Amino acid sequence: MTVELHVVPPGGGEVDHVKKLSEGQMGFVPRKGEYVLFKEEEGTSAFEVINVHSFYEKGQINKFIISNIIVEAEPVILPEGLESEPHKKLCAYHKVIKKYPETIY
Protein backbone atom coordinates (compact mmCIF):
# COMPACT_ATOMS: atom_id res chain seq x y z
CA MET A 1 0.00 0.00 0.00
CA THR A 2 1.23 3.48 -0.82
CA VAL A 3 0.20 6.75 0.78
CA GLU A 4 0.67 10.07 -1.01
CA LEU A 5 0.11 13.62 0.19
CA HIS A 6 -1.11 15.77 -2.71
CA VAL A 7 -0.66 19.46 -1.94
CA VAL A 8 -3.19 21.76 -3.60
CA PRO A 9 -3.53 25.56 -3.43
CA PRO A 10 -6.07 27.10 -1.03
CA GLY A 11 -9.57 26.68 -2.42
CA GLY A 12 -8.51 23.67 -4.52
CA GLY A 13 -6.98 23.41 -7.94
CA GLU A 14 -4.15 21.53 -9.57
CA VAL A 15 -1.81 19.46 -7.41
CA ASP A 16 1.25 21.56 -6.54
CA HIS A 17 3.48 18.71 -5.46
CA VAL A 18 3.30 15.15 -4.17
CA LYS A 19 4.96 13.76 -1.08
CA LYS A 20 5.19 9.97 -1.13
CA LEU A 21 5.02 8.34 2.27
CA SER A 22 5.73 4.81 3.30
CA GLU A 23 3.24 2.87 5.39
CA GLY A 24 5.62 3.19 8.31
CA GLN A 25 5.52 7.00 8.11
CA MET A 26 1.75 7.09 8.49
CA GLY A 27 0.52 5.78 11.82
CA PHE A 28 -3.03 6.57 10.69
CA VAL A 29 -4.86 8.02 7.73
CA PRO A 30 -6.03 11.56 8.53
CA ARG A 31 -9.62 12.58 7.91
CA LYS A 32 -11.05 15.65 6.21
CA GLY A 33 -10.64 18.71 8.44
CA GLU A 34 -7.66 17.33 10.36
CA TYR A 35 -4.17 18.80 10.22
CA VAL A 36 -0.96 16.96 9.40
CA LEU A 37 2.49 18.16 10.41
CA PHE A 38 5.80 17.06 8.94
CA LYS A 39 9.07 17.67 10.74
CA GLU A 40 11.82 18.74 8.39
CA GLU A 41 15.49 19.49 8.97
CA GLU A 42 14.97 23.21 9.47
CA GLY A 43 11.43 23.31 10.83
CA THR A 44 7.93 22.01 10.22
CA SER A 45 5.36 22.05 7.43
CA ALA A 46 1.60 21.93 8.11
CA PHE A 47 -1.39 21.07 5.96
CA GLU A 48 -5.16 20.85 6.40
CA VAL A 49 -6.70 17.72 4.92
CA ILE A 50 -9.46 18.55 2.45
CA ASN A 51 -10.12 15.09 0.99
CA VAL A 52 -8.99 11.47 1.24
CA HIS A 53 -9.21 8.99 -1.64
CA SER A 54 -8.80 5.25 -1.06
CA PHE A 55 -8.18 2.96 -4.01
CA TYR A 56 -8.90 -0.77 -3.78
CA GLU A 57 -7.91 -3.76 -5.82
CA LYS A 58 -9.35 -7.23 -5.88
CA GLY A 59 -7.42 -9.68 -3.76
CA GLN A 60 -7.91 -13.35 -3.14
CA ILE A 61 -11.36 -14.88 -2.72
CA ASN A 62 -13.27 -11.80 -3.89
CA LYS A 63 -11.94 -9.58 -1.11
CA PHE A 64 -10.82 -6.06 -1.86
CA ILE A 65 -7.71 -4.59 -0.29
CA ILE A 66 -6.50 -0.99 -0.15
CA SER A 67 -3.75 -0.46 -2.70
CA ASN A 68 -3.30 3.32 -2.58
CA ILE A 69 -4.39 6.24 -0.42
CA ILE A 70 -4.22 9.85 -1.60
CA VAL A 71 -4.55 12.60 0.98
CA GLU A 72 -5.35 16.00 -0.57
CA ALA A 73 -4.27 18.89 1.64
CA GLU A 74 -3.81 22.66 1.60
CA PRO A 75 -0.85 24.37 3.26
CA VAL A 76 -1.48 26.41 6.41
CA ILE A 77 0.70 29.00 8.12
CA LEU A 78 2.49 28.00 11.31
CA PRO A 79 3.64 30.44 14.02
CA GLU A 80 6.96 32.19 13.43
CA GLY A 81 9.88 30.00 14.34
CA LEU A 82 8.11 26.69 13.68
CA GLU A 83 7.83 26.82 9.86
CA SER A 84 10.56 25.48 7.64
CA GLU A 85 11.89 27.85 4.99
CA PRO A 86 10.47 25.76 2.09
CA HIS A 87 7.05 25.77 3.77
CA LYS A 88 7.19 29.56 4.21
CA LYS A 89 7.97 29.91 0.51
CA LEU A 90 5.13 27.53 -0.42
CA CYS A 91 2.66 29.56 1.68
CA ALA A 92 3.92 32.85 0.19
CA TYR A 93 3.72 31.46 -3.37
CA HIS A 94 0.07 30.44 -2.86
CA LYS A 95 -0.81 33.54 -0.81
CA VAL A 96 -2.02 31.35 2.05
CA ILE A 97 -3.92 33.23 4.75
CA LYS A 98 -5.28 30.32 6.82
CA LYS A 99 -3.31 29.73 10.01
CA TYR A 100 -2.79 26.58 12.01
CA PRO A 101 -5.31 26.73 14.89
CA GLU A 102 -3.82 28.18 18.06
CA THR A 103 -5.91 25.89 20.23
CA ILE A 104 -4.01 22.84 18.92
CA TYR A 105 -0.43 23.81 19.86
Image (spheres, rainbow, N blue to C red):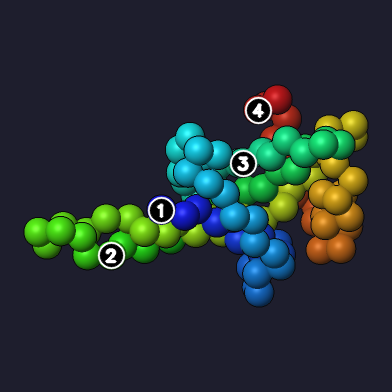
- Amino acid carrying label 2: it is Glu
- Count of numbered circles in the view: 4
Tell me, yes or no, if residue 52 can be seen here.
no
CB contact under 8 Å: marks 4 and 3: no
Q: Nearer the viewer, mark 1 or mark 3?
A: 1
Mark 2 or mark 3, which is nearer the start of the sequence? 3
Mark 3 or mark 4, which is nearer the start of the sequence? 3
Mark 3 is surrounded, within 10 Å at the Cα level, by few (under 14), some (14 to 19) or many (20 or more) other residues, namely: some
Q: Nearer the viewer, mark 4 or mark 2?
A: 2
**Residue that label 3 marks:** 36
**Residue that label 1 marks:** 1
Is residue 48 left or right of 81 when viewed as pictured?
A: left
**Residue that label 4 marks:** 104
Q: Nearer the viewer, mark 1 or mark 4?
A: 1
- Amino acid carrying label 3: it is Val
CB contact under 8 Å: marks 1 and 3: no
**Residue that label 2 marks:** 57
Q: Report how far apart the C-alphas of labels 3 and 2 lie in the structure.
A: 27 Å
Tell me, yes or no, if residue 20 can be seen here.
yes
Mark 4 is surrounded, within 10 Å at the Cα level, by few (under 14), some (14 to 19) or many (20 or more) other residues, namely: few
Q: Report how far apart the C-alphas of labels 4 and 2 lie in the structure.
A: 37 Å
| Res 16 label | none
SS label for mark 2: strand
Mark 2 or mark 4, which is nearer the start of the sequence? 2
- Amino acid carrying label 1: it is Met
Q: Nearer the viewer, mark 4 or mark 3?
A: 3
